[in-house]
Structure formats: C-alpha cells, structure tokens
Amino acid sequence: MEPDGRRPGEFIAALVREGAEVLPGPPALAVPAAPADEVIAAARRLALAARPQRRPGPAPAPTLLRLATALVVDEHPSAPAWSEAERERLAGWVAVLIEHRGEDGVEELVGALNGG
C-alpha cells in the first residue's frame, strides 16, 4: 500500500481516468532537465525501434496517452516549460513505446535521457 492509502493499481487506474490529483513536490522522473525536442527525439527513436511496423507517426490508444502523460510527460523536470504541442507530441511517442515495450520502454527512455 502507498503512503496515501491506495494500492499501486488503484493509483494508476486513477491516473488513467484523468481524475487523479496532482501531488505537490519535485517531479518523480529522475532525469536531467532538457529541451522538449531532445526528449521527443529520444522517445521517438526508441518507439520506432520498438514497433514491429514503421508508421508515419504515433497512433496509440487514448488510455496509453493518458498513462504516458501522467507517468512520464508530467513528471519530467522540464515539462512546465514545454508547450502543449510539445507535451502532446512527447506523450504520443511515449505511449507507442509503452504499447510495444511496456515498463521496459520507459526504463530505456529514462536511461537514454540520463546519457545511457
């Protein structure tokens, strides 16, 4: 159980429903600050490598878009400085990455953003 009393699955379900409250504190994604274009490029590169077929752009399920936004985009330390269009573009690529690689894809992205 988490400190707020919810189980992890309940917390993630609330995030996906778009009704989760934003908790105060520092961003949870342990990556350095970076311009949106750099983060988008890393996510795009990993997502394209993970997809079985090449498509012109991301077309993930809406649920995965919300999950990508809540767990990755909103938690990046530079996110407040990015435009809405940049945030949406990043969410799309992260959602494709999650669709094809799951948690491993997010971990690969964090590693890439940390210079790995």
Image: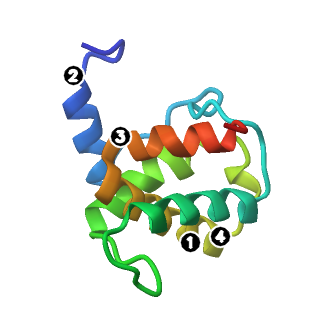
Q: Quadrant of residue 88?
A: bottom right
Count of picture labels:
4
The image shows residue 65 at horizontal and vertical percentages of: 37, 63
Q: In this view, does 1 lie to the left or right of 88?
A: left
Instruction: State the residue at coordinates (27%, 61%).
Output: 63
Query: What whole-number distance in Å separates the C-alpha atoms at marks 2 and 3?
Result: 18 Å
CB of mark 2 within 8 Å of CB of mark 1? no
Mark 3 lies on residue: 103
Mark closer to the chain start, 2 or 3 = 2
Dot 4 or dot 3, earlier in sequence = 4
Q: Point out residue 75 in the picture as x, y percentages from the top left corner.
A: 57, 41
Which SS class for mark 4? helix
Q: Distance between the residues labelled 3 and 1?
A: 19 Å
Q: In the shown orientation, is residue 53 left or right of residue 49?
A: left
| Numbered tag placed on residue 7 in the rendering | 2
Front residue of 4 and 70: 70
